[in-house]
Amino acid sequence: MAYTSILAVHRLDRSVEYVMDKDKTSRTGAGSASSLAEAVDDARDREKTECGVFESAIGCTLDTAYRDMRANKERWGRMDGVQGYHLVQSFAEGELTPELAHRIGLELAERLLHGQYPAVVATHLNTHCLHNHIVWDSVAMDTGRKYRSSARTYYTGVRAESDRLCRQYGLSVIESPESERGKKQYGKWLAEQNGKPTWRTAIRQDVDSAIAASLTWRQFVKALEGQGYELRMQRKYPTLRPPGKERCVRFKTLGKQYTPEAIRMRILYPRRGTKGQAVPRVQYARLRTRGRPVRGFTGLRALYYRYLYELGALPKRPVYPGYAVRQDIRKLDQYVEQMRFLSRHGIDSREQLAEYRKPLLDEIAALTKERHGLYRSAPDSPRIGQITARLKVLRKEIRMCGRIEKHSMEIGQRLAEARAEQKKYVEKEKQKGADKAEKRRDALQRDSRFH
């Protein structure tokens, strides 16, 4: 099965020593390379590549690979920071030939680098598992821009492309627990890592409340269905569909404590605070009112205030927070910021929002024209920096106005859905109350007959 790892290469000052003195080139593996030259030499270790049969170069030559990469850095003046990257791609024992492994390594390098970064690709045969080493310069040949490596680029680029190539050639890939749960967008992963709410937060809250109100699995199902959820249990991966949504959500994607088996255990043993059963608290933004109720809001500010109330961002909480609103809880911080913007500038209507934005656009146009003139006449003028800083502030304000204009329309629609949902909930509760009262009357009548 394909396994990939990527390391940043530092210490360019040692590279010349390794190029000039081959006896110092480390052959202890990719994990110990501390310089770009050392990484290139290790990738091209002739004892591991069968006399260079499975070696290739991209954007440089094999014999002068390091010198070509160094010359590329000097040409762009990018000698500082990370000097390059060293990628190792390993395959399961006996799955493929050296020729195919090398071809996959070349295709992976082409897909990742697009021919922009000088690179060396070598396939090592010295272990039971064939593996590729790809070493590339951190500076692009055509633009001088540096390659950026992060958790996001690794999972969405390196690992995804490697797995895609392996599947294309009929090879196995590592199916980690994360991939078994399905692909997770980087923004959602980052929000959950930082304790921020996502659209799944509302679903988890509904599941938690249904668990708390249930003594059996059947009661749990009825509680969720009463909130408008549709459950589909007779399938390989049980799912639930939130109210008003077309797509279903698998229970297991909500977390370890939200699989059907875990939910049954939580219903059977409802012990709060037991290790492994605690539900993590999500930190929400709060709109501070300094203990005084905010009155006199109209238009956009009233709309945002009502929405923040429905989201639970105010001290007073709604009786029935509908899913139509709470599914948008991941944007709570944005809505609080927009509410503060409206209050700070006293904006209550879209017309006032357009009036506020117009002089900003005019100022941006004037400053942009002035800066273009300075670029030609006085490129070293400190005024350019001042204009750039001011433009940054103005454009941020323009973006805020655009988001408010867009989000206010969405908020109005969601509030209408929430009101309809709340009306159904109230009617259902009234009907439950009426049914209970009728049952009590029937019971009293039966008792009176016997007496």
Image (cartoon, rainbow, N blue to C red):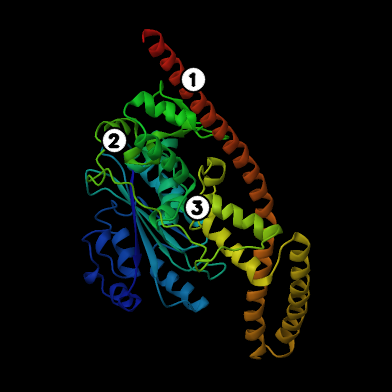
**Mark linked to residue 41:** none
> Residue 444's quadrant in the figure?
top left
Which amino acid type is marked by label 3?
Gly
Q: Is residue 210 left or right of residue 41?
A: right
Which amino acid type is marked by label 2?
Arg
Residue occupying image coordinates x 37% and y 23% = 218
Upstream in the sequence, badge 2 or badge 1? Answer: 2
The answer to whether mark 2 and mark 1 are in CB contact below 8 A is: no
Mark pair 2, 1: CA separation: 34 Å
Q: Is residue 398 left or right of residue 441?
A: right
Residue 203 location, x and y as percent?
Answer: 45, 40
The kind of secondary structure element at disc 2 is helix
The quadrant the C terminus occupies is top left
Upstream in the sequence, badge 3 or badge 1? Answer: 3
The kind of secondary structure element at disc 3 is loop
**Mark linked to residue 312:** 3
Residue occupying image coordinates x 61% and y 63% = 338
Residue 236 location, x and y as percent?
Answer: 38, 24
Camera-nearest label, 3 or 1: 1
> Residue 445's quadrant in the figure?
top left
Upstream in the sequence, badge 2 or badge 3? Answer: 2
**Mark linked to residue 438:** 1
**Mark linked to residue 266:** 2
User: 10 Å neighbourhood of mark 1: few (<14), some, or many (≥20)?
Assistant: few
Camera-nearest label, 2 or 3: 3
Mark pair 2, 3: CA separation: 26 Å
Mark pair 3, 1: CA separation: 35 Å
Q: Is residue 114 left or right of residue 255?
A: right
